[in-house]
Amino acid sequence: MLAITRQNQVKGATKMAKWEYLVEELTITDKWNSNKRAEEFEKFSSKLNSLGNEGWELISYQAIPLVGSWSKEVKGYAYLGMLKRALS
């Protein structure tokens, strides 16, 4: 985990907010049909809600291409969520 700070003004005083960051794999299968759509969205929402209940806030979501070492062709994607939460 990585913690960095940001300044906030609170009634004329400077308070340093501290954040904790998490990178989490949040993959929805790329091979799905309309019957699988609801199930995949439910699993994805459930994972986000679980992280949210732990205080995590999704701040970015990226598809990272996975490239073959010899062919240099895209073989698939890793879907990564970047999350943050305030440190106590």
Image (cartoon, grey):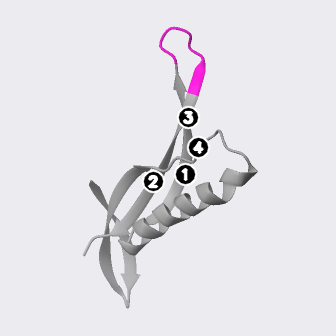
Residue at mark 4? 29
Q: Nearer the viewer, mark 4 or mark 2?
A: 4
Element at badge 2? strand
Residue at mark 1? 61
- Is 19 positioned to the left or the right of 66 in the image? left
Element at badge 3? strand
Mark closest to the chain's N terminus, 3 or 1: 1
**Numbered range of the magenta stretch:** 68-75
Q: Amino acid at mark 4?
A: Thr
Based on the picture, tell me whether residue 71 belongs to the magenta stretch: yes
Q: Are marks 4 and 3 in contact (CB under 8 Å)?
A: no
Mark closest to the chain's N terminus, 4 or 3: 4
Residue 7: give x, y in percent of width and height. Answer: 36, 71
Label 4, label 2: how many angstroms apart (C-alpha)?
19 Å
Label 3, label 1: how many angstroms apart (C-alpha)?
12 Å
- Whether 33 is drawn above or below 59: the answer is above
Q: Are marks 1 and 2 in contact (CB under 8 Å)?
A: yes
Q: Amino acid at mark 3?
A: Tyr
- Whether 58 is drawn above or below 63: the answer is below
Q: Amino acid at mark 2?
A: Met
Residue drawn at the location 39% of the way across and 81% of the way down: 9
Label 4, label 3: how many angstroms apart (C-alpha)?
10 Å
Mark closest to the chain's N terminus, 4 or 1: 4
